[in-house]
Image: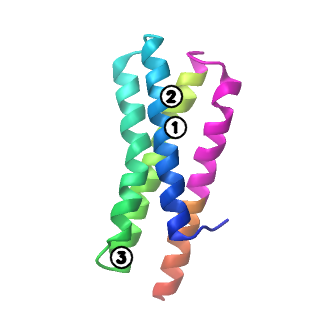
Amino acid sequence: MTASPQNIQERTFAYACRIVKLHDVLRERKVAPRLLNHLVGSGTAIGANMQEAQGAESKADFIHKCNIAIKEVRETHFWLRLIAANKYVQPEQLEPILNETNEIISILVAIVKKTRQGMK
């Protein structure tokens, strides 16, 4: 699955908005602030890194920024799984955002692979 740069920009921004809303719900439920800080930090860093990638100075820099975004989305996946495992919300309520997390990982990996192929 591939996406245009504009599409992934919008998608990661919308994802960050969803993470912020989830953070607010979990904060009301008295979830540990440290866990919430990690979730919102990594969940919003994905889009921020993709925004930086748009202004990359080279293809190598673009790939580097995308790889950072991949690391952040994988970290976010971990925090979401932890939240589900501890039943702070019903696991099925997190299913849509976990699915989106997996799709974003796939898209970013495809973007990096395609960009690398273009460098050969």
Q: Residue at x 60, y 67 (%)?
A: 3
Q: Which residue is mark 1?
A: 18
Q: Amino acid at mark 1?
A: Arg
Q: Which residue is mark 3?
A: 60
Quarter location, residue 50: bottom left
**Which residue is at the far top?**
30
Q: Which residue is mark 2?
A: 22
Query: Could you give the CA–CA distance between mark 1 and mark 3, rounded to whole angstroms?
Result: 30 Å
Q: Give percent across and percent down for residue 45.
A: 37, 47
Give the magenta part as a residue range.
85-106
Query: Could you give the CA–CA distance between mark 3 and mark 2, rounded to whole angstroms?
Result: 34 Å
Quarter location, residue 7: bottom right
Q: Is residue 34 left or right of residue 18?
A: left
**Could you say which is closer to the camera, residue 26 or residue 67?**
26
Q: Is residue 97 magenta?
A: yes
Q: Residue at x 54, y 31 (%)?
A: 80
Q: Residue at x 51, y 67 (%)?
A: 6
Name the mark nearer the viewer: 1 or 3: 1
Circle 1 Cα neighbour tier, 10 Å, few/some/many (<14 / 14–19 / ≥20) = some
Circle 3 Cα neighbour tier, 10 Å, few/some/many (<14 / 14–19 / ≥20) = some
Q: Is residue 93 magenta?
A: yes
Question: Contact, CB < 8 Å: mark 1 with mark 3?
Answer: no
Name the mark nearer the viewer: 3 or 2: 2
Query: Could you give the CA–CA distance between mark 1 and mark 2, rounded to whole angstroms?
Result: 6 Å
**Could you say which is closer to the camera, residue 9 or residue 40?**
9
